[in-house]
Image (cartoon, grey):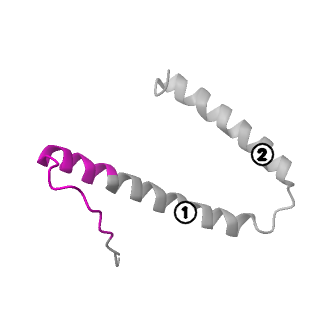
Amino acid sequence: MNMTEIVVRIPTEVSEELLARLKKDIDMVVRLRVARELLLEKWDERLARSNLTEEECLTLGREVNKASLKLWKQKGWVG
């Protein structure tokens, strides 16, 4: 897979420890954002022919969020 490089400028006074943490954090944020955007594109393609109204979609989304939260609580992943 081809990759594009992004340059982030950090002051030279930053410690090596902080720099290492920043690299990990930035990498994670970028990966999550790219995954989100790709997922949204796929969903847009799949839902393009949907007959659901915007309100129905919002209602279904809220139901999914509630069910997910309940499951996460049961597994102890959230308080």
> In the figure, is residue 32 to the left or right of 18?
right
Quadrant for residue 4, please give it.
Answer: bottom left
Labels in figure, total: 2
User: In this picture, which residue range is highlighted in magenta?
Assistant: 6-25
Q: At which x and y percent is residue 19?
A: 19, 50
* Residue where numbered disc 1 is placed: 37
Q: At which x and y percent is residue 38?
A: 54, 65
SS class, disc 1: helix
> In the figure, is residue 20 to the left or right of 68?
left
Q: Is residue 42 found inside the magenta-colored segment of the image?
A: no
User: Which mark is on residue 74?
Assistant: none
Within 10 Å of disc 2 (Cα), the crowding (few <14, some 14-19, many 20+) is few
Q: Is residue 12 found inside the magenta-colored segment of the image?
A: yes
Within 10 Å of disc 1 (Cα), the crowding (few <14, some 14-19, many 20+) is few
Identity, as a three-letter code, of the amino acid under mark 1: Glu
* Residue found 66% across the figure and 62% down from its top: 43
Of the image marks 2 and 1, the number of the one nearer the N terminus: 1
Identity, as a three-letter code, of the amino acid under mark 2: Leu
Eyeballing the image, is 64 above or below 23? above
* Residue where numbered disc 2 is placed: 58
> In the figure, is residue 52 to the left or right of 17?
right
**Mark 2 and mark 1: span between their CA atoms?**
19 Å
Of all residues, the one furthest to the bottom in this rendering is 2
Eyeballing the image, is 58 above or below 49? above
Eyeballing the image, is 67 above or below 14? above
